[in-house]
């Protein structure tokens, strides 16, 4: 049994969705279109959306004619995603550190920094290995991660966000290895809540080494959701594309 971690409770909390409700959905739609235009997958290609949340990208990929599976550890998110499932779109509660289908998918996606959450380095390697095992030979993996240097240069130490009457007090810091966000608020019952997000501050080289160790070859790197050239200081995102040899 894998031990309880911060992401298991926070991602299953209804307040997670409230805090992040203002994310740019059009930007997300455009990103998925840009990825598919770049990858040029054949109709009927098998895809897995790792850390799929409520299935936004999975649904988009299935609508474009692909056979899609979405997996996520958050049971509440998968329960909502399952309301959209059909014969070409499936969802499962699954831990990304554990192998799922083996040598099966043509494409794997891990989007919007849905990785790097683990306290132990071994778990990062387990996840990378599981990603690779799920792909057939020649299959593609897309990792969409934060760009550490850009985030650190633009990070607000303190911030207040009010959504749906909930006042979220947020503080951020960097401990040399992780970007840490503390989220404090009173829930609707007036009970004080405190959640912590802790994400590894991986560099491009860190991610390259992690996936090279499991037989993945880097073929492209982009710096934003329009797939512009990556710049270590200026790019908001670090989007890496790998192929399984």
Image (spheres, rainbow, N blue to C red):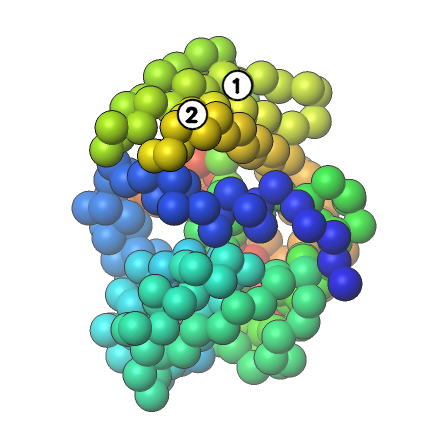
Expressed as whole percent of the image width and height from the top left, the position of residue 91 reads 43, 73
Furthest toward the left, the residue is 26
Q: Which residue corresponds to the image point at 57% horizontal and 31% vertical from the top-left?
A: 196
Furthest toward the top, the residue is 157
Using the rendered image of the protein, determine whether residue 174 is visible from the camera's viewpoint: yes
Mark sitting earlier along the chain (2/1): 1
Q: Mark 2 points at which residue?
A: 185
Residue 223, image quadrant: top left
| Picture layout, residue 132 above or below residue 21 | below
Q: Mark 1 points at which residue?
A: 172
Q: Is the C terminus in the top left, top right, bottom left or bottom right quadrant?
A: bottom right
Instruction: Report how far apart the C-alphas of labels 2 and 1 lie in the structure.
Output: 15 Å
Q: Is residue 13 left or right of residue 25?
A: right
Give the crowd class for mark 1: few <14, some 14-19, many >=20 residues within 10 Å: some
Expressed as whole percent of the image width and height from the top left, the position of residue 54 reads 36, 59
Expressed as whole percent of the image width and height from the top left, the position of residue 52 reads 43, 60
Q: Is residue 20 left or right of residue 116?
A: left
């Amino acid at each position: 049994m894998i031990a309880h971690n911060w992401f298991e409770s926070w991602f299953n909390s209804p307040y997670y969705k409230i805090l992040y409700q203002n994310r740019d959905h059009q930007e997300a739609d455009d990103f998925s279109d840009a990825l598919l235009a770049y990858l040029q997958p054949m109709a009927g290609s098998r895809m897995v959306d790792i850390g799929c949340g409520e299935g936004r990208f999975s649904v988009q990929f299935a609508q474009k004619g692909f056979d899609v599976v979405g997996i996520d550890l958050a049971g509440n998110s998968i329960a909502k995603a399952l309301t959209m499932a059909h014969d070409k779109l499936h969802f499962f509660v699954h831990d990304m550190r554990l192998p799922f289908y083996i040598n099966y998918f043509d494409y794997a996606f891990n989007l919007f920094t849905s990785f790097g959450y683990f306290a132990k380095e071994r778990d990062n390697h387990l996840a990378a290995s599981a990603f690779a095992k799920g792909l057939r030979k020649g299959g593609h993996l897309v990792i969409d991660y934060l760009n550490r240097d850009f985030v650190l240069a633009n990070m607000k130490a303190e911030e207040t966000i009010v959504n749906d009457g909930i006042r979220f007090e947020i503080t951020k810091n960097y401990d040399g290895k992780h970007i840490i966000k503390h989220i404090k608020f009173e829930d609707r019952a007036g009970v004080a809540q405190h959640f912590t997000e802790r994400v590894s501050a991986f560099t491009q080289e860190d991610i390259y080494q992690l996936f090279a160790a499991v037989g993945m070859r880097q073929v492209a790197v982009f710096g934003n959701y329009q797939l512009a050239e990556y710049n270590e200081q200026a790019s908001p995102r670090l989007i890496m594309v790998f192929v399984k040899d």
